[in-house]
Image: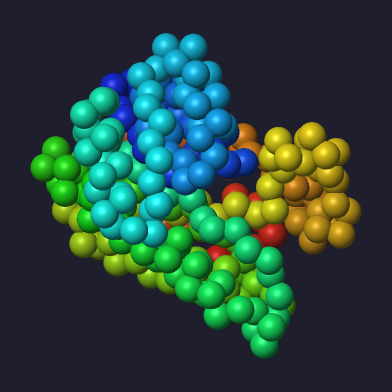
């Protein structure tokens, strides 16, 4: 048994970012063609595009502000013209900001998290789900976070945005399930990425001691779950929030 995404076309938003690059690379290694989305870092997106093409995949690098519906619809048309119809969407992009307390957090940061978590999810659904309905199948995969179950100080804007995203995904799963479209979320913990490897910051004993597996997860471990949810192996899983964090948070029943 193996994950085979041959013949599938995947859009990864925020594909030029730390986790996004590994997701796109892993999905391509499984046989998928990839639309590499970026907002501002064209150089990294083009580098990733070239890498995926070396694997024999069809790719396109597409720029868009996913907080704006018109931009997402334009991106869809560009992908359609160059590659075809999207089968799988991985919503990974999110706006970065400095975390602080509720009393000190600028209101603009709550707006940015709403736009990049909730509105991105809505825009991607409006743009790409109709084609999935027409072909009676598809995958919507959102990247959430363990933070929504932690509710630690200074997390408020991020948690508010991601909790809103969670609501959109759970309801969308019920609305489109009859069309054999699955809608799921992957919730990473504090994940080791290339930035950590470059800066030699992989280890954090304080965090690791709180994790049952006593370590931080890796970007590859997140990408592996995304690939599983993108595949036919997950055909009867929908509406799920799946923590990939070594047991650091555990949803209850």
For residue 208, which quarter of the picture?
Answer: bottom right
For residue 61, which quarter of the picture?
Answer: top left
Judging depth in this view, the residue of 152 and 49 nearest the camera is 49
For the point 36% across and 19% down, which residue is it? Answer: 58
Residue 163 in sight here: no
For the point 40% across and 17% down, which residue is it? Answer: 57
Q: Looking at the picture, how far across and down is residue 11, in whole percent? A: 37, 38
Up-down: is 105 above or below 148? below
Judging depth in this view, the residue of 179 and 53 nearest the camera is 53
Up-down: is 171 above or below 32? below
Q: Looking at the picture, how far across and down is residue 30, in whole percent? A: 44, 23
In the picture as drawn, the residue positioned furthest to the right comes out as 205
Up-down: is 187 above or below 222? below
Going by the image, does 117 lie left or right of 224? Answer: left
Judging depth in this view, the residue of 165 and 69 nearest the camera is 69
Quadrant containing the N terminus in the rendered view: top left
In the picture as drawn, the residue positioned furthest to the bottom comes out as 103
For the point 49% across and 18% down, which residue is it? Answer: 50
For the point 49% across and 12% down, which residue is it? Answer: 54
Q: Looking at the picture, how far across and down is residue 253, in whole percent? A: 50, 70
Residue 103 in sight here: yes
Q: Looking at the picture, how far across and down is residue 121, in whole percent? A: 36, 58
Up-down: is 237 above or below 9? below
């Amino acid at each position: 048994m193996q994950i085979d995404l041959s013949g599938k076309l995947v859009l990864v938003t925020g594909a030029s970012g730390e986790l996004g690059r590994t997701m796109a690379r892993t999905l391509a290694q499984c046989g998928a063609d990839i639309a590499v989305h970026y907002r501002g870092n064209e150089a990294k997106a083009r580098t990733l595009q070239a890498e995926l093409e070396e694997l024999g995949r069809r790719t396109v690098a597409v720029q868009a502000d996913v907080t704006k519906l018109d931009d997402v619809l334009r991106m869809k048309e560009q992908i359609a013209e160059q590659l075809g119809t999207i089968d799988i969407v991985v919503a990974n992009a999110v706006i970065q900001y400095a975390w602080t307390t509720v009393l000190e957090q600028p209101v603009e940061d709550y707006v940015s998290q709403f736009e990049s978590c909730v509105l991105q999810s809505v825009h991607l659904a409006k743009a790409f789900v109709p084609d999935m309905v027409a072909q009676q199948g598809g995958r919507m995969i959102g990247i959430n976070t363990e933070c929504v179950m932690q509710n630690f100080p200074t997390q408020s804007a991020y948690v508010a945005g991601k909790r809103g995203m969670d609501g959109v995904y759970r309801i969308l799963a019920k609305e489109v399930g009859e069309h054999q479209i699955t809608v799921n979320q992957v919730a990473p913990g504090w994940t080791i990425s290339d930035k950590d490897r470059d800066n030699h910051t992989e280890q954090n004993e304080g965090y690791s001691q709180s994790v049952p597996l006593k370590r931080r997860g890796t970007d590859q471990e997140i990408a592996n779950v995304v690939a599983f949810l993108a595949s036919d192996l997950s055909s009867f899983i929908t509406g799920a929030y799946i923590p990939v964090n070594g047991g650091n948070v555990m949803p209850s029943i």
